[in-house]
Image: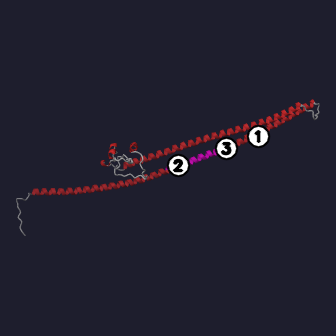
């Protein structure tokens, strides 16, 4: 082997060698510390993401349970309302049946009373007629000497008989008219009672409907408040996503639309309406409409006006 000679003049000093070794050792230590910090930060991020996912699952499960409980409460409330409405309707129906029965009994009593009065009047009329005939016969017998001879009736007796028949017919007609008037009055009173009952039933139904609307509105407001409260809790527990400035969707102005619109002479269908949302990525595609396109038959100005009116 060849001997190598070492130039003693170019060798560094001991202090310089120690300093270079210390610098190299510091670099190695810093590199190892940096790697440890990176690994620790990565592990903490993984742990935090797992915790967030678990919290989201727990929050979702709690929300579903709360929704089920709210639906069950609403269903129970609706069943209670239906049961109370059925009970009230049954009570009203029973009341109407009782009123109809009472009205029928009252009509029967009125008819019986009217029939008795009519029979009494007819009996009294017969008695008066018999008494009148007896008085006429007695007067006639007294005038003729107590004998009644065939062929001795004159004009006065015939006129009196015809007058009595006319009076009897007139009285019968008056009784019939009175009976009809009484029946008409009874029918009119029945119609008035029925109209009043119908109006009362309509008022009760209206009040029941208003009460049911108020209860339904209160339940909806209560459910909406619970949903808002749950939404606030979720917003507090979940991290807020802040989009990057380049991902924010900005609405186009009219000049941009005129500049980008193709210059052709054919009427074109206006572009679909864009949603001016601040936290939606511009690359998000909304689902296409399922309706088929129709041929354009109007001029371009009409489409422009309708698009800007939207």
Judging by the rendered image, the residue that carries numbered circle 2 is 78
Q: Which mark is residue 100?
A: 3
Question: Is disc 2 surrounded by few (<14), some (14 to 19) or many (20+) residues within 10 Å?
Answer: some
Residue 118 visible somewhere in the drawing: yes
Say what secondary structure mark 2 lies in: helix
Residue pointed to by mark 1: 115
Answer above or below: position of 50 versus 147: below
Residue 128 can be seen, yes or no: no
Q: Element type at marker 3?
A: helix
- Between 17 and 129, the residue placed more toward the observer is 129
Q: Residue at x 50, y 49 (%)?
A: 74
Magenta segment boundaries in residue numbering? 73-100
Residue 177 in the magenta stretch? The answer is no
**Vertical arrangement, residue 35 with respect to residue 304, above or below:** below
Q: Residue furthest front?
A: 265
Q: Which one is in front, 172 or 4?
A: 172
Farthest top residue in view: 143
């Amino acid at each position: 082997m060849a001997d190598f000679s070492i130039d003693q003049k170019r060798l560094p000093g001991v202090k310089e060698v120690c300093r270079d070794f210390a610098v190299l050792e510091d670099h190695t230590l810093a590199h190892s510390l940096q790697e440890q910090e990176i690994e620790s930060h990565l592990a903490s991020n993984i742990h935090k993401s797992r915790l967030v996912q678990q919290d989201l699952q727990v929050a979702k499960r709690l929300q579903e349970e709360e929704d089920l409980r709210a639906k069950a409460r609403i269903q129970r409330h609706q069943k209670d309302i239906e049961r109370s409405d059925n009970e009230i309707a049954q009570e009203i129906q029973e009341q109407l049946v009782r009123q109809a029965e009472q009205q029928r009994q009252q009509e029967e009593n009125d008819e019986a009373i009217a029939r008795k009065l009519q029979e009494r009047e007819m009996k009294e009329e017969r008695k008066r007629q018999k008494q009148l005939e007896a008085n006429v016969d007695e007067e006639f017998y007294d005038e003729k000497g107590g004998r009644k001879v065939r062929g001795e009736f004159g004009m006065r007796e015939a006129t009196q008989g015809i007058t009595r028949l006319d009076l009897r017919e007139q009285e019968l007609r008056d009784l019939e008219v009175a009976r009809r008037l009484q029946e008409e009055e009874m029918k009119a009173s029945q119609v008035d009672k029925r109209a009043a009952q119908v109006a009362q039933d309509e008022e009760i139904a209206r009040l029941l409907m208003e009460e049911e609307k108020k209860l339904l509105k209160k339940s909806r407001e209560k459910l909406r408040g619970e949903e808002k409260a749950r939404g606030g809790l979720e917003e507090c527990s979940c991290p807020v996503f802040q989009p990057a400035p380049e991902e924010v969707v900005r609405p186009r102005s009219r000049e941009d639309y005129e500049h980008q619109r193709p210059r052709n002479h054919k009427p074109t269908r206006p572009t679909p309406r864009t949603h001016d949302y601040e936290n939606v990525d511009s690359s998000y595609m909304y689902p296409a409409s399922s309706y088929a396109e129709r041929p354009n038959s109007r001029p371009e100005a009409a489409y422009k006006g309708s698009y800007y009116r939207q």
